Image (cartoon, rainbow, N blue to C red):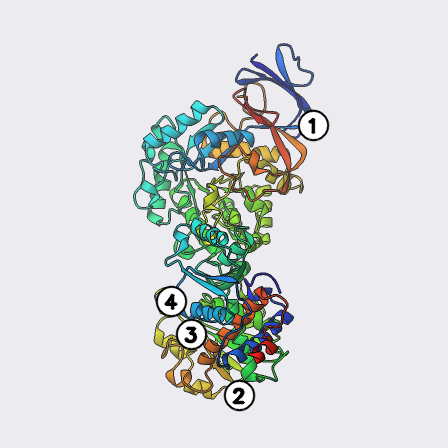
């Protein structure tokens, strides 16, 4: 049976409608659609969104398959309602050649849970010295359009300028991990009241803000587009707001955890809260929410960063940075943005599907829920309330800061080009 | 008393005074021909040092031995930070050996807290210095030294440091001694002023219960004690201050500056001292400098802490039993 009728779903949070899928595309959207010959999914009360798109995922393969693989990572993505993820380049070997990006892309296609769009490294080996073969990665089967040295900042202003200029030839974008390296030597957490007390090395907001300021000016100067990864401070918001008002082609992302958690949690010294950029203050969190609501921050991206248990079950300074996020992202966004009245579900669709697909040029994703469009869809039970249990994660890693915490919302179904990858909360 | 001693901030005023009073009792043991109490007989204490510190380790070891504990010294030279699992693995090894208390020194802030709260071990955890975070027994021995000098050995019993004005000078940013002292001295009612170049004061210091000044000379006349912190020479290369000489001119304690302190005021230093830069020999060797007393008091304080965490409810020093001998 190739037809599926999703009955009575609130499309983008609006009035209940039926959505009929035929094969890989949406055949019709309307009320009272016939279920003849179709498998019926009763969706009354649930919200139907275009399949989510994550512009910032770490899949760890190749090289750290003990943390995550393309298979486990894309299963986690499907569980979280994603139909496309952009896989970061900091693998081993680094995704800085056509060969590596093609391998990652093909694994995504073979497994079939989620489209994997590899991100190419900006510089060879993420070393910040020499441009990687950006054009070759773009022309490869993977069709790379997003380039990032994420985990490391492209801190050399000339290299950054050249990268911004070079990718214009094929509509690429440079996604910057904004972290001035000298200002963050030995950094362990946000620099401020809590770091002063705990005696942990400070990661000052200005280390992020100064790079963003530089890069938006560079983007303006060379007429290119730049994307700011995981923006985390109130000051960064101000700079992006200013840059947009000036017409600079800048986009920015925020992670779910930066919308919810603060550096007060570091008082536990529990490395599950260790992440880069670090958790900031309540004031930053509120500024980020507001900026996501008013569009200054364009998208939510997970920075899903799986790590094995032993890399987190140790003292703070020794622990790896990062937290998993694919399977909890939508719940955190619902809690921080929807349930607070800052964003409608249509706004969520815009920031978690439409815009990220647009920034990354992900074909067939982030499309309207209407006839003739690819059937990449996500169905969400927004009434659900439950505690997060990492034991049930599809990700290979369990480093979530939300263990035992109640979060709202649950993705029940995900369809990738009409094929169900998640049914009633279970992976197919 | 809590089961662990991780931070000076965890101590209430009454806890702290109890430790200081108990340390006075312990100090009397040092005056006896046989400097030993049976209090912790049969208890095993491990000194787990991931970071070199001969002074602190020997001080703890002396305290443990005077209380008749069985002592194991474990020196994990080099950092566990390069392979993070080693703290947990080491802890569990010690747990399996039936250790009652772990005295831990670690280069990473928070390592003792993790050890005490992660369920890796059941033993009591005593922080002997973690990164740039805390060194609570150092703060206690400093407070003990101040109480003895500024109030008096017997007159001080049961007393805190209310109204005393303490100035702490030097590399506050990297100093666990400064953090511990600010917390404890505030709890004990003293007024603390931190003095340092702005580069060596942490961002976020404004919430600490103390004053901050960049000018040493303006604080000297109103200080009952001036505590000099150690300044590592490598800080100069990281541009925290221009030259050693400039640091010394602005923040070093010399005879002229000491002369401007009130007559009763003391000079303290956690050691080891960098003579000539942070303190001149004239000051370091003067009667007003308590460095050597601080070392001796450290043993008494550590005996008191170990006793109170592990000894239970019996009096610290069983006078009758000792007199029988």
Residue that carries the numbered disc 2 in the rendered image = B264
Q: Residue B235 carries which label?
A: 4
Q: Is label 2 or label 1 in front?
A: 2
Q: Do labels 3 and 4 share a chain?
A: yes
**According to the image, label 1 marks what residue?**
A45
Q: Local crowd at mark 3 within 10 Å, few (<14), some, or many (≥20)?
A: some
Label 4 packing within 10 angstroms: few (<14), some (14-19), many (20+) = some
Do marks 3 and 2 share a chain?
yes
Residue A199 horizontal/vertical position (percent): 49, 61
Residue corresponding to mark 3: B271
* Residue B205 appears anywhere in the view: yes
Residue placed most toward the observer, B88 or A379: B88
Residue A375: quarter of image: top right
Eye-nearest disc, 3 or 4: 3
What residue sits 67% from the left and 42% below the top? A340
**In the current view of this chain or complex, which residue is farthest to the left?**
A130
Chain assignment, label 1:
A
Q: Earlier in the sequence, mark 4 or mark 2?
A: 4
Q: How many labels does the image show?
A: 4
Mark before the other along the chain sequence, 3 or 4: 4
Looking at the rendered structure, whether the residues under marks 2 and 1 are on a common chain is answered as: no
> In the image as oriented, which residue stretches furthest toward the top?
A37
Q: Distance between the residues labelled 1 and 3?
A: 69 Å
């Amino acid at each position: 049976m190739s037809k599926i009728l999703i009955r009575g779903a609130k499309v983008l949070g609006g009035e209940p409608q039926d959505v009929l899928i035929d094969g890989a595309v949406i055949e019709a959207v309307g009320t009272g659609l016939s279920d003849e010959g179709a498998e019926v999914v009763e969706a009354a009360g649930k919200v139907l969104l275009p399949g989510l798109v994550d512009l910032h995922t770490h899949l760890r393969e190749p090289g750290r398959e003990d943390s995550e693989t393309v298979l486990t990572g894309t299963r986690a993505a499907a569980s979280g309602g994603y139909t496309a993820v952009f896989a970061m380049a900091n693998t081993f070997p680094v995704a800085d050649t056509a060969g590596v990006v093609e391998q990652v892309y093909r694994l995504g296609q073979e497994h079939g849970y989620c489209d994997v769009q590899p991100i190419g490294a900006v510089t060879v080996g993420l070393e910040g010295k020499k441009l990687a073969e950006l054009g070759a990665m773009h022309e490869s089967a993977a069709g790379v359009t997003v380039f990032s040295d994420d985990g490391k900042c492209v801190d050399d202003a000339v290299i950054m300028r050249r990268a911004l200029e070079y990718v214009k030839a094929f509509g690429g974008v440079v996604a910057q991990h904004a972290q001035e390296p000298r200002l963050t030597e030995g950094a362990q957490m946000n620099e401020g009241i809590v770091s002063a007390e705990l005696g942990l090395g400070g990661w000052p907001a200005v280390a992020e803000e100064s790079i963003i300021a530089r890069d938006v000016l560079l983007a303006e100067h060379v007429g290119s587009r730049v994307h700011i990864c995981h923006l985390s401070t109130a000051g960064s918001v101000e700079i992006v707001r200013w840059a947009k008002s000036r017409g600079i082609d800048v986009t920015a992302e925020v992670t779910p955890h930066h919308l919810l958690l603060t550096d007060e949690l570091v008082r536990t010294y529990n490395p599950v809260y260790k992440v880069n950029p670090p958790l900031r203050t309540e004031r930053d969190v509120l500024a980020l929410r507001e900026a996501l609501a008013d569009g200054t921050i364009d998208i939510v991206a997970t920075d899903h960063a799986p790590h094995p248990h032993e890399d987190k079950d140790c003292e703070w300074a020794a622990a790896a940075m990062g937290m998993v996020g694919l399977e909890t992202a939508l719940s955190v966004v619902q809690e921080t943005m929807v349930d607070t009245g800052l964003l409608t579900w249509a706004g969520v669709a815009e920031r978690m599907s439409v815009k990220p697909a647009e920034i990354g040029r992900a074909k067939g994703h982030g499309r309207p829920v209407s006839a003739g469009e690819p059937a990449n869809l996500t169905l969400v039970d927004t009434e659900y309330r439950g505690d997060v249990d990492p034991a049930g994660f599809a990700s290979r890693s369990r480093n979530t800061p939300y263990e035992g915490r109640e979060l709202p919302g649950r993705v029940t179904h995900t369809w990738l080009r009409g094929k169900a990858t998640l049914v009633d909360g279970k992976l197919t | 008393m809590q089961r662990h001693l991780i931070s000076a901030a965890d101590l209430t005023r009454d806890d702290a005074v109890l430790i200081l009073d108990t340390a006075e009792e312990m100090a009397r043991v040092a005056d006896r021909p046989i400097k030993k109490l049976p209090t912790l007989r049969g208890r095993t204490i491990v000194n787990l040092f991931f970071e070199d510190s001969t002074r602190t380790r020997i001080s703890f070891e002396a305290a443990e031995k005077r209380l008749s504990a069985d002592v194991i010294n474990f020196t994990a030279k080099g950092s566990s930070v390069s392979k993070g699992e080693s703290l947990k693995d080491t802890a569990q090894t010690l747990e399996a050996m039936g250790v009652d208390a772990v005295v831990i020194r670690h280069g990473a802030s928070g390592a003792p807290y993790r050890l005490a709260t992660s369920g890796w071990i059941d033993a009591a955890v005593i922080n002997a210095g973690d990164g740039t975070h805390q060194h609570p027994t150092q703060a206690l021995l400093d407070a003990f030294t101040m109480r003895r000098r500024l109030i008096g050995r017997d007159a001080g019993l049961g007393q805190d440091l209310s109204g005393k004005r303490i100035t702490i000078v030097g590399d506050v940013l990297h100093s666990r001694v400064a953090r511990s002292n600010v917390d404890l001295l505030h709890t004990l009612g003293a007024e603390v002023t931190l003095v340092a170049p702005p580069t060596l004061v942490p961002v976020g210091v404004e919430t600490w219960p103390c004053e901050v000044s960049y000018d040493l000379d303006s604080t000297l006349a109103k200080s009952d004690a001036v505590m000099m912190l150690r300044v590592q020479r490598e800080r100069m290369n990281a541009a925290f201050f221009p030259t050693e000489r400039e640091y010394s001119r602005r923040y070093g304690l010399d005879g002229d500056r000491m002369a401007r302190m009130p007559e009763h005021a003391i000079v303290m230093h956690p050691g080891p001292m960098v003579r000539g830069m942070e303190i001149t020999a004239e000051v370091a060797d003067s009667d007003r400098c308590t460095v050597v007393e601080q070392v001796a008091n450290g043993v008494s304080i550590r005996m008191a802490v170990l006793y109170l965490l592990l000894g239970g409810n019996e009096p610290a020093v069983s006078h009758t039993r000792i007199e029988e001998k």
